Image: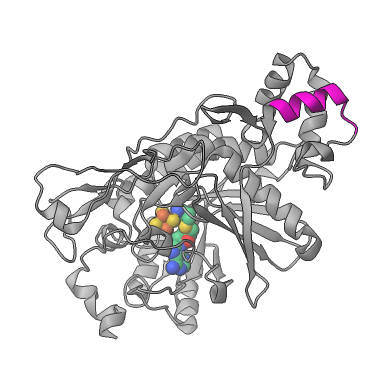
Amino acid sequence: MRRLGIITVVSPTLLSSTPSFTRTLSLTLQSPLRNHRLTNSITFLKSRSLASFSSSSAAYLPALDYEFPSTKGSVATRDDDNKKVILKGMTYASLQEWVESHGFRPGQAMMLWKRLYKDNIWAQNVDQLEGLNKDFKRMISEHAEFGALSFKDVRSASDGTRKILFTLDDGLVIETVVIPCDRGRTTVCVSSQVGCAMNCQFCYTGRMGLKRNLTAAEIVEQAVYARRLLSDEVGSITNVVFMGMGEPFHNIDNVIKAANIMVDENGLHFSPRKVTVSTSGLVPQLKRFLRESNCALAVSLNATTDEVRNWIMPINRKYKLSLLLETLREELNSMHKYKVLFEYVMLAGVNDSMEDARRLVELVQGIPCKINLIQFNPHSGSQFIQTDEDKMIKFRNVLAEGGCTVLMRFSRGNDQMAACGQLGMLGAIQAPVMRVPEQFRTALKASA
Ligand code: SAH
Ligand code: SF4
């Protein structure tokens, strides 16, 4: 029996009977694998003053203070017992440093980098490092690992969207989606966490709670693997969106590092404009991202009042709409030709009135942006109903007449649960369902 870690579990009964903010339950689990320590955390911060939980008087906010095994430092290693570095977790600068520390030349580091990421090689093992000298290859096989993920399965939806499932070293599963689009564009949608702590009420991944952060290597490998597996079938993968499982800014160190690796011009060479990181609105991390990364930003707005956003996106209780939008207004106005993409999932009777549309026009005034109206993707247990297409179009027209640039995104990969907000797998413990404000109760499924 091996102790794998602490699982912080919060259940309604536990919370309603405890005066403290969180309760921690330590579990001892049988290790299915050698050499892996898992810190599995599902935590929700309790805040009685803000809202109430549907089956108790307690209320919850996503906690932003998880403790994870540190992923900082330039070289990512597998674990304490096995000091091999994981190649995909290194930026070029740190790869070069590591190569030199073993007595090899910077030029050899570049040859290795190119074989990992370029020219359709995407090397998975030392045998695929053609042209590298023998001693260098021996050193690599002794001290480094290539893969960070194990392929589990790929599922194709009727519209051509593919969902790839990967198993992680600790047995957890993540999902990556490849979406072929028109005009030669194919997008890979990568996950940044296993599950998500933000508990957005319309999102399947949110129901899982957070299991753990992905390492930079686990994020980068999703894009490399998608290219290797599907480029022949779907053509070159041109865009990356961090819109899979998880809140990227809750794992910002690894996300910024992974995005840097993806845009390196000697490697995967995605254009920074075509790598988009999407956030539910973690304001301090959003500022940091805009200062440290040149990749694109999307913000999931999804509501035009704090009342609705507090309910459907509990992170809004910490970072209110006005703070989020004012921060964007300030930051973007000092940037050159940079536009944020606002995502707006349309939920019938909740955020899709013409009044919402007019309010949205007002809210985004002065922010260089585009707005993406997203059709809600249903999933088991979800209370929400899709806005019909006619209404989406009317909503879009109000925004366009108000001077906004608007796009509409209809469901992709729905029949394989590969669409936005449908990724993940629910376990026994699920995130709490928030209390529905009185005036929206009739808009939800149970009452439809
Ligand atoms: N956590 C990040 C990125 C992952 S979610 C974020 O929230 O931005 C990616 C997008 O999917 C977000 O815009 C989110 O609002 C949207 N989404 C979540 N659940 C959805 C659902 N059931 N139907 C349609 N879009 C959904
Ligand atoms: Fe997390 Fe994004 Fe889903 Fe919200 S919408 S629960 S932030 S993955």
Asked if residue 441 is positioned above or below residue 278 in the image, the reply reads below
Between residues 400 and 144, which one lies in front from this camera angle?
144
Q: Nearer the viewer, residue 300 or 109?
A: 109
Give the position of the N terminus as an image quadrant. top left
User: As drawn, which residue projects farthest toward the right?
Assistant: 131
Q: Residue at x 38, y 73 (%)?
A: 347
The quadrant of the rendering that contains the C terminus is bottom left
Q: How many marks?
A: 0
* Residue 162 in view: no
Which span is picked out in magenta? Answer: 131-142
- Give the vertical position of 58 relative to 116 (above or below): below
169 or 342: nearer the viewer: 169
Determine the residue positioned at 49% across, 81% down. 389
Residue 397, position in %: x, y?
49, 74
Secondary structure predominantly adopted by residues drawn in magenta: helix
Q: Return the residue found at the far front.
A: 1
Q: Quadrant of residue 169?
A: top right
- Relative to 42, does residue 445 appear above or below in the rendering? below
Residue 283 position within the rendered picture, expressed as x and y whole percent measured from the top left: 38, 42
Please check the rendered image and state whether residue 7 is part of the magenta-colored stretch, yes or no. no
Q: Residue at x 43, y 38 (%)?
A: 285
> Taking 225 as reference, is 335 left or right?
left
Q: Is residue 23 left or right of residue 331?
A: left
